[in-house]
Every structure is written in C-alpha cells, then in structure tokens.
Amino acid sequence: MSESAKGQLSILVCAILWSTSGLFIKLLDWNPLVIAGGRSMLAAIFLILIRPIVREKSAPGGVTITPCFIASGIVYAATMLLFVTANKHTTSANAILLQYGAPIWAALLGWALAGEKPRREHWFALAAVIIGLCIFFKDGLSGGGITGDILAVISGITFGAHSVFMRLQKNANPADSMALAHIICTAFALPFAIRHPPVFTSTSTAVILFMGIVQLGCASFFFSYGIKRVTAVRTMLTCTIEPVLNPLWVFVVTGERPDLWAVIGGIIIVSAVLSSSLAGRLKPPKHFFSVQQ
C-alpha cells in the first residue's frame, strides 16, 4: 500500500470515529465547554503516552515549535470548543452541515498558504459535496438555534485552517500539534469546569472516557498520520463521510431511520469523495513543499 493510500485510509478511520461525537455530546448532560475540555484532557494524555511509539521517522525527537505548530493547535482547539457548543445550541444536523463548509476554506487557505492549487476534480467534488449535504439535511436547518448555527459555521472555518497548518509543518510530528490543541482546549475549559462541575455517573464516566480516548485520542492519531500523506482538500473531502455516518449511529441506538433525501444526499457525498480520490491516484499531486512560495 502506498503512503498516499495509507494516509487516505487513516483519514477515513478518523472520520468514522469523529462521526460518533454528535450522539455522545447529546447524551452527556454537562456544560458543553466542560465536555470539550474533559475529552481533550484524556486525548492529550493518550497522545503524550503513545508519542514514543508512533513518532514519525522524519520528525525530530523533541517538539518542534514553529508558528504553524502554534497556529494549528489554536485553531483546532477552537474547532473543538465551537463544535461541542454548537451541538448544544442547535440540532446535530445543523452543526455537522454548517461545519462542513470546511472543504471550501481548506481549498482556499491551502491554495494561499501551502501552494496546493485545487484541481478541476476537487472543485467538482466540492460542489457535489455541498449539493449532497444540502439534500442530506433537506429538513435539517429547521429548528436550529441561530447561536449554534453561527458557531458551527466558524468551526468549519477553523477546521479547514487546521488541516492546512498541519500540512505546513515540514518534518514535524503532527500528533504534537494535536496534543497541543487538546492541552489548549483543556486549559480554556478549566474555569468552566470549576463553575459548572460535571456530575459523574457510570454512564457519564463511560461516555467521557470513550470520547476522550477513542473518539478523540485515537482519531487524532489517525488524522495526524494521514494529513502528512494527502492534500488538505482530499482530507476535508474524505472527512465529509462523518455527517453521512451520524444518522447510522442514531439508527443503531434509537431506531430512527434516515429518510429518502438523506440516502440520496449520502450517495452523492460518498461518490464525490471516491471519485476525487480515484482521480488523485491517476494524477499524483505535486508536494507543496516543492512549490515556490
């Protein structure tokens, strides 16, 4: 398997893990910032513990602190805080849909900052993703809160920026940026945890452990591995599988079935991701580090 294929598979696994977040955020009756900080604290510990095992061969032994390293930590911490809060102030469908303006921002920022000019198939795929999401959540924008909707849009911008800043870290360990983001998120949420102390039950403890170690920690590892091997645009396109899977988890847990529009939209999104990936394999992307800045 090529490095590009490994990266694509890693991003796919990451998206599957991320897709469980909306359900568990709704199930956990805590302050949203406390949820974000709690799961990030566990994820940071997990990433720090596994760092000696999974460190990139091309990365130095210590942490390389650069402007892009700090920027990626800040924007991803903002993404997590914004997304969890959005889920508490609007519908899960709204939060997912509006965050997934991220591929557009990734394409524009990747072009401006990383020299990764989107190809024709990327633009067609981006258009198809937007159409698919609109069809998928045809009735999803009713009943949402304006505050949550705005926060979800902003989280899409920060998420797109995060993927670009991650790829700009040449010869660095991307997992370090993810760990930094989780540390920043934890520190930001600490005052809210003191003001709104979480209530621990067997269920809430199990949920926060899963969210922190598996849904964020393991996903962060897969994302940091994959982002070094595929372009920012292809990363965001693959991650759009996340909102497609969300209703499947809801169906497994609650028995709720997606409607016909959701099925049609999901098919369009998956087709766009697969077609873009296949086109990319036929025309390997020029690595942006070789592009004159």
Image (cartoon, grey):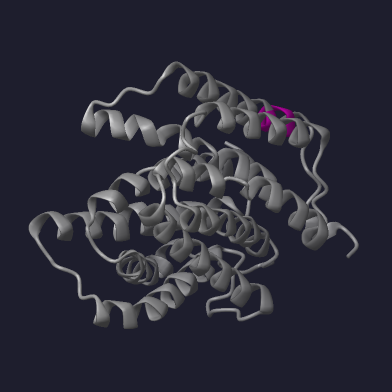
Residue drawn at the location 12% of the way across and 66% of the way down: 200
| On screen, residue 203 above or below 42 | above
Residue drawn at the location 82% of the way across and 33% of the way down: 120
Residue drawn at the location 51% of the way across and 62% of the way down: 79
Task: Name the outermost residue toward the left.
Answer: 202
Queried whether the magenta region covers residue 281, the answer comes back as no
Secondary structure mainly formed by the magenta segment? helix
Q: Quadrant of the C terminus?
A: bottom right
* Whether residue 3 is visible: no
* Residue 51 location, quadrant: bottom left
Residue drawn at the location 66% of the way across and 79% of the way down: 66
Q: Nearer the viewer, residue 101 or 53?
A: 101
Along the horizontal axis of the image, is 205 left or right of 288?
Answer: left
Q: Nearer the viewer, residue 192 or 181?
A: 192
Q: Nearer the viewer, residue 248 or 177?
A: 248
- x%, y% of residue 77? 49, 69
- x%, y% of residue 14? 45, 47
Tally of marks: 0
Residue stretch rendered in magenta on the structure: 276-280
- x%, y% of residue 137? 50, 32
Q: Nearer the viewer, residue 186 or 84?
A: 84
